[in-house]
Amino acid sequence: MSSETVKTIGGKVHFLERIALTPNSTLHVRLLDVSLQDVVAKELAVQITPNAEKVGLNFNLTYKHADVLPGHTYAISASITLEDRLLFATTQQHPVELGVDYVKEQEVLVSLV
């Protein structure tokens, strides 16, 4: 059994368009280290939720506390897909402060693409 400390950050993804999600939509939410420019962001956690139109757009990302480095910048990225087609995605960085005792529930906006 591992003794690594893990933390969870949760919230909800939402969009402004007043439309229903297509059946078989999939929600993808990622917690990323976006500190370095011109480099692919390091993924700390991911949640993939199939049938998002039925189960909702809530998320809980569990990450290792040891992966949180002082001075680094972290963000949540979200998208909604149908098969391999992107329907919605975050278009602005959604920063989140990690390494603190309490992280409030996150509200992540995605836009129609």
Image (tube, helix red, strand yellow):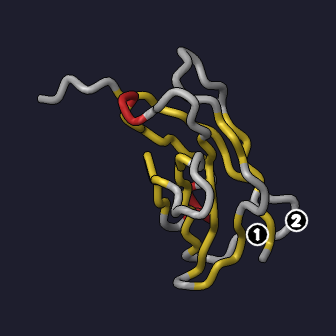
Residue found farthest to the bottom: 84
What distance separates the C-alpha of mark 1 from that of mark 2? Answer: 7 Å
Q: Is residue 111 left or right of residue 40?
A: right
The kind of residue on which mark 2 rests is Arg
Q: Badge 1 is on which residue? A: 20
Quadrant position of residue 79: bottom right
Q: Is residue 39 left or right of residue 93?
A: left
Q: Is residue 98 left or right of residue 44?
A: right
Question: Foreground: 111 or 76?
Answer: 76
Residue drawn at x 63%, y 68% as measured from the top left: 80
The secondary structure type at the circle numbered 2 is loop
Q: Tell me if residue 63 comes above or below residue 99 in the rendering.
A: below
Give the percent coordinates (x, y) of residue 48.
Answer: 47, 60
Q: Badge 2 is on which residue? A: 18
Give the percent coordinates (x, y) of residue 64.
Answer: 36, 34
Which label belongs to residue 91?
A: none
Q: Tell me if residue 4 comes above or below residue 80 in the rendering.
A: above
Residue drawn at x 41%, y 37% as measured from the top left: 63
Residue drawn at x 59%, y 41% as measured from the top left: 74
Question: Foreground: 37 or 84?
Answer: 37
The kind of residue on which mark 1 rests is Ala
The secondary structure type at the circle numbered 1 is loop
In the rendered image, the quadrant that contains the N terminus is top left
Residue drawn at x 62%, y 57% as measured from the top left: 37
